[in-house]
């Protein structure tokens, strides 16, 4: 099981000070994270990863089907379809920005996972997507402001909403296609569950992580496996990103 590294647990970090020491301690912590999830992800097939997660992560649900089709508009105005995401591992969830409780907490948990992913070469192979289920209120400007508020890095994070000619409930119906509902209530809120969907580089929906009690390292392990295509024969880990990290050190 992944154990976070405390800065005060290392003698160098405990007694050092200054900007240089802070940078070095951060690098040591990143190395520990890297070793932890590469060790967990060292398997011969995605079946091995699935079996490991089904044993260790009770909120993990393996799936193998095509991602539901959609045509949506990004906050910057461009049109986005599943075909546009080919070659990327997609970590996707549904939100609405006026949600008073679980939506912002979910976004912030995924922001934590994004930081872990973006500290590795996976950064260029993974995209995080938030789809609003309240397009009438969640205008592009509202969505653009939501990201920085909750720590989301726009470098590989997309906010999607409906196009002007689409019905208002289009994204709520898309959520249903992904297996859960956002149900409007009389007070203007939406009743819904919390699910993180993971899609592989070929556009196949491969897993759900339910709720917010799953271990971030488990989702990162799964994303790492998909981003490195572990289903096919592959080089030894020494040729991967851990080797690059070792050479940097």
Image (cartoon, rainbow, N blue to C red):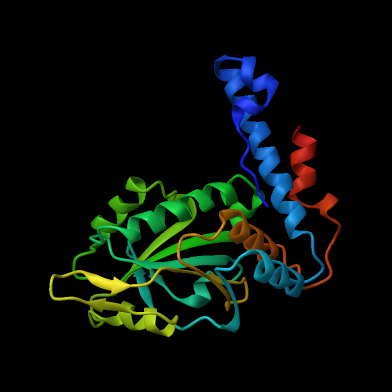
Identify the residue at horizontal 79%, vertical 38% (top origin): 246
Identify the residue at horizontal 61%, vertical 65% (top origin): 57
Is 201 drawn above or below residue 143 in the view shown? below
State which quadrant residue 104 falls in: bottom left
Total marks in image: 0
State which quadrant residue 73 falls in: bottom left
Foreground residue among 164 and 145: 145
> Which residue occupies the extreme left position in the image?
187
The location of residue 54, given as percent across then percent down, is 66, 71
Is 162 drawn above or below residue 148 in the view shown? below
On the picture, is 128 further left or further right than 103? Answer: right
The location of residue 99, given as percent across then percent down, is 26, 61
Quadrant containing the C terminus in the rendered view: top right
On the picture, is 216 further left or further right than 37? Answer: left
Foreground residue among 249 and 11: 11
Foreground residue among 37 and 89: 37
Foreground residue among 211 and 25: 211
Identify the residue at horizontal 64%, vertical 22% (top origin): 13
State which quadrant residue 216 falls in: bottom right
Is 222 drawn above or below residue 162 in the view shown? above
Identify the residue at horizontal 66%, vertical 64% (top origin): 56
The location of residue 125, given as percent across then percent down, is 61, 59
The location of residue 145, given as percent across then percent down, is 28, 50
């Amino acid at each position: 099981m992944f154990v976070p590294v405390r800065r005060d647990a290392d003698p160098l970090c405990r007694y050092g000070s200054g900007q240089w020491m802070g940078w070095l301690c951060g690098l040591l912590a990143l190395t520990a994270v890297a070793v932890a999830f590469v060790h967990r992800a060292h398997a011969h097939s995605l079946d091995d990863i699935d079996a490991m997660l089904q044993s260790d992560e009770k909120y993990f649900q393996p799936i193998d089907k095509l991602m539901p089709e959609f045509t949506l508009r990004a906050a910057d105005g461009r049109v986005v379809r599943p075909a546009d995401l080919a070659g990327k591992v997609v970590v996707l969830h549904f939100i609405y920005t006026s949600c008073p409780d679980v939506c912002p907490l979910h976004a912030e948990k995924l922001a934590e996972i994004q930081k872990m992913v973006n500290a590795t070469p996976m950064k260029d192979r993974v995209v995080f997507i938030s789809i609003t289920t309240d397009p009438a209120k969640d205008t592009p400007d509202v969505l653009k402001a939501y990201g920085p508020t909750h720590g989301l890095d726009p470098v590989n994070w997309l906010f999607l909403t409906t196009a002007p000619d689409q019905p208002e409930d289009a994204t709520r119906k898309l959520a249903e296609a992904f297996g859960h509902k956002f149900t409007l209530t009389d007070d203007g809120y939406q009743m819904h569950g919390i699910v993180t969907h993971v899609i592989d580089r070929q556009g196949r929906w491969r897993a759900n992580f339910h709720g917010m009690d799953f271990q971030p390292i488990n989702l990162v392990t799964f994303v790492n496996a998909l981003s490195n295509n572990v289903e096919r024969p592959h080089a030894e880990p020494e040729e991967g990103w851990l080797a690059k990290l070792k050479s940097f050190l």
